[in-house]
Image (tube, coloured by chain):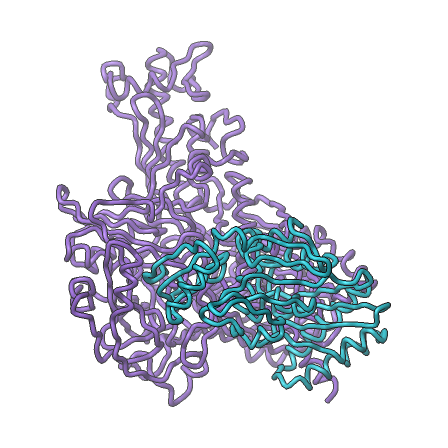
Chain colours: A cyan, B purple
Amino acid sequence: MKPAAFSYHRAASIDDAVNVLASAGGMARALAGGQSLMPMLNLRLAPLEILVDLGYLAELRQCAEQVNSVRYGTLVTHAAFEDRRVPDASNGLMPHVATRIAYRAVRNRGTIGGSIALADPAADWLPTLIALRAEITLAGPRGRRTVAVPDFVVGAYTTALQDDELIEAITVPRQSKSEKWGYYKVAPKAGEYAKSLAIVLLNVPGGSACVILGAVDGAPLRLPATALAALDGADEAALARATRAELMASGRDFSGIKLTLHTTTVVRAIMDARAK
Amino acid sequence: MAGIETGSQGIGAAVRRNEDQRFLDGKGEYLADLQFPGMLDVVFLRSPVAHARIKSVEIPAVRRGSVFLANDIANARPIVADGATPGFKHSEYPALARGKIRFVGEMIAICIAPTRAEAEDIAQSCVLDLEELPAVWDIDVALASDAPLVHDHWTDNIFVETSIKAGDLDRVRSQAEVVVHKTSCMGRHAGVSLEGRGVLARYDRRMDELVVYSSTQFPHVIRSILAQSLSIPETKLRVVAPDVGGGFGIKNNFHPEELAVAALAINLARPLRWIEDRREHLIASPHAREHRYDVTAYADRAGRILGLSSTVTVDAGAYSVWPWTASMEAGMSAGIMTGPYDIPVYHGRAVTVCTNKSPLGPYRGVGRSGACFAIETMIDAVARAVGRDPFDVRLENMVPSSAMPYRSATGKLYDSGDYPACARQAIATIDVAAVRERQARGETDGRLIGVGMASYTEQSAHGTAEWVARGLPVVFGYEPALARFTPDGKLVLYVGIQNHGQGLETTLAQVAHQELGVPVSEVVVRHGDSSMCPYGMGTFASRSMTMAGGAVSVACRELAGKIKRIGAHLLQAPVDLVKLGGGAVSFGQKEVRLREIADAAFLHPERLPVGEEPGLESYAVYQPELSTGAFSYASHACVVAVDPGIGAIELLDYVVCHDCGTMVNPLIVEGQVVGGVAQGIGTALYEEICYDSNGQPLASTFLDYMLPGAAEVPDVRVLHIETPSPHTRLGIKGMGEGGAIAPPAAVVNAINDALCRLGAEIAQTPVKPERVLAAIAQAQNAARS
């Protein structure tokens, strides 16, 4: 399949990109790494009149180290995280997550901003950024606004991003050194999208814990009761019971098989954090 | 073997492939590399629905002249592939749909434009007015008494049903101490070649002929059927297969795309080309597998199988593919069901069902992959039923070497070999005893280890008798070879096979080397062009090395005689005392080079012996003495780790012990085996196209369609046994498909060996993680209730 005709605009600045997006009446898309958008265009699944290429905006690749956080430009690639070419605020979680995204060829071009803008429920960054309490800076015709990630993700492929806005940066708070992270991902084969994905942050000295489950047919799911059980030192069987109970009470419709799968994923992510 | 000093290049030598030079340098020329002035790209407007009547196709006024419907290619007769079996229902597969649509992806219109993107725009601008009909999307739906009919003039949705009855099953029933009944099924999938299909047609004004380039496995046969379908003489048609990037059977059919493009290229007198994209390939190229099995084994209490009854039901999709017919899968499966086992009594039914899906066609391991899956999982089930190790039960049921040659219950003649010895080698190499110890210890990560095995016997290189018995429109009985020297003493082989990854440009040169001593790297093999090469059947059914190798051997042997006569004459030596080898004919210390002999033969007939005909070429046609096929065989054994928490399966080890008779090139044999295993692992664990109840395929890109990759295919350990076939020249048996036959059975047996501790069992491929979790959950529920 080849894409239908569209016009191409190489953005000269963030303002220029925003202006073009704003004037296209919803028929423009911002191009970051193109690892999802280009196949969708080829399959003619994404109706489009103007493609606004952000790729030449060097400022969107910048990272800034702040006292309590690191601000990542939207165009930082998965490979840049993987290779630790950008500062890390996450005690190594973000570089680790990046190594498990698709294949290296995809990671070379795919970007963190592009990934969260698409909000594929099976993708990796949204649950990670929710766990890390990251904030997203959006640029639009009305200026900049900052939203917390849980407020940004509305559901599967649905975000708070307006047609005339683009993601400028993602700011990740520096995590406590006493915090341990856990990660577990199930995919049908190497490099594929997740069938289940859990991110766990466990800070036993600090008395805090966070469990986020991804690949759940909607926005990533926070499991606070399970996180408490993890903090309380519950054993594997107890963790599994807590997870299953919380998933069943979540209001999401999980099949029996999905319950088993997600429960395993969560428990293994917690055990991964504990093993560090 | 001929009296040639072959050094390290002849039959059996691990020579590197001649053709790799161009492939590795990116110099291969595939269909999409061909360019002709004025050529337009074709996009087919394909049906978005499974079953409908076409009320109208609205073409925007500005697009008239760029969109063509069935009436615009009235010169294309529909494809008819009716089997000779009585009761086989007649159907017509039109190049472009007329009146009715029968599967998602069926072609309705041809759209042409200077680029593919513009042609897609045109296709998108057409509006289809369709009266949708209920979709026949599944075997059960198709067989329901009130099912909608895929072909309106039929009385039901069954292409054909056949049966085999060998021996007295009633007697076996009354004798059996153990009866095991088992159902199993294989998912439908695509045959994924790296290069998709493609066809380019242009009219050659000077030759007054249509030239059709197609990414096909059998260009000569395509010429015959295309000429027939277009009502033009074969002299006015040339079919060329350029480099073909994998076929696996998918490119071994006469495709409606070939017919449509050729017909329109004649009518428009313009070069047209169609390059299949991956989405079309997954949705609309011939599909593979989708078998259901219902098998009952009657055994004694030691697990010796006394008799077997089985029904295989195959979802053949909407149309019968040419030349194989819709019933090939079911027929082959039922015909080889007893496999390498000595099962004297067998009753088999084969039912071929018609549905609103892309037609089923041949795919590496045709039919036998399913039969192997059914019988091999049954062997394990019988072993469990009698409380014995499946490896022992398997060996005890096998045809012993003392029984060779052996005629199976279905009438197949197993020509040679030692099946139990092969199986024992596989068992020893995978080290079943060590796996059993590991299982007893348990895994720290909670995974379950399983070891499994599957054996098969594979009819290969079948000739006239077999194809006549199957009642196909064409009988693929032989292969030709024209061996021709150039005046400067170099050899060119012109053959009717079509090399698309099998290394035939090298292995045929090795056979020539065996007869003539010419350096393998200097032998040129020409194939794939109906105007250049002698008429042959192409490459499929694990036949090319046996058939074309035999023909090259015969032709070169004849040439060797002539070369010696000329050489002896030039040396003034007695012909029975000269030697041919090292690029020369020699007598004692004296020698005359091939170059001088060829020079004499072509350019200096005055130097030839009296009565010797000028020129240096030989044409031979070869067919095996026994045309029912040479039987290769193998045992595959593997170790898996099953993660019961997530249903994931990891292949920890994979061993193949096989016997394909004389190996011409062990490197190539090993590559073929490993490649086949990789595809078999795809069938076993990953590849599937499910359909929903509207007849919509649920996998149409590689996002949804899983193929095994480097991380999923283990390092396959291959052990060779060489028992030359008594019935083929050089003792060669076919081996191209074998690797793909056993993996579904071996892998599932290993998974079930792991899962039996949980009381769970898998009977369906691909074994996706959710199926493992479902089987475990089912076992847990059964244990609770």
Using residue B783 as the reference point, say whether residue A253 is left or right of it: left
Q: Nearer the viewer, residue A139 or B76?
A: A139
Does residue B228 appear in this view?
Answer: yes
Q: What is the quadrant of the C terminus of chain B in the image? A: bottom right
Query: Which of these two is toward me, B315 or A135?
Result: A135
Residue visible at 53% across and 64% down in the picture: A167
Residue B574: give x, y in percent of width and height: 38, 15
Q: Is residue B103 left or right of residue B311?
A: left
Q: Quadrant of residue B263?
A: bottom left
In the displayed structure image, the side of residue A123 where residue B754 appears, left or right = right
The location of residue A116, given as percent across then percent down, is 56, 66
* Front residue of B412 and A193: A193
Q: Residue at x 68, y 69 (%)?
A: A133
Estimate the x, y position of residue B223 in percent, counting from the top left. 25, 52
Query: Is residue B399 at least partly visible in the picture?
Result: no
Left/right placement of residue B327 relative to residue B648 reads: left
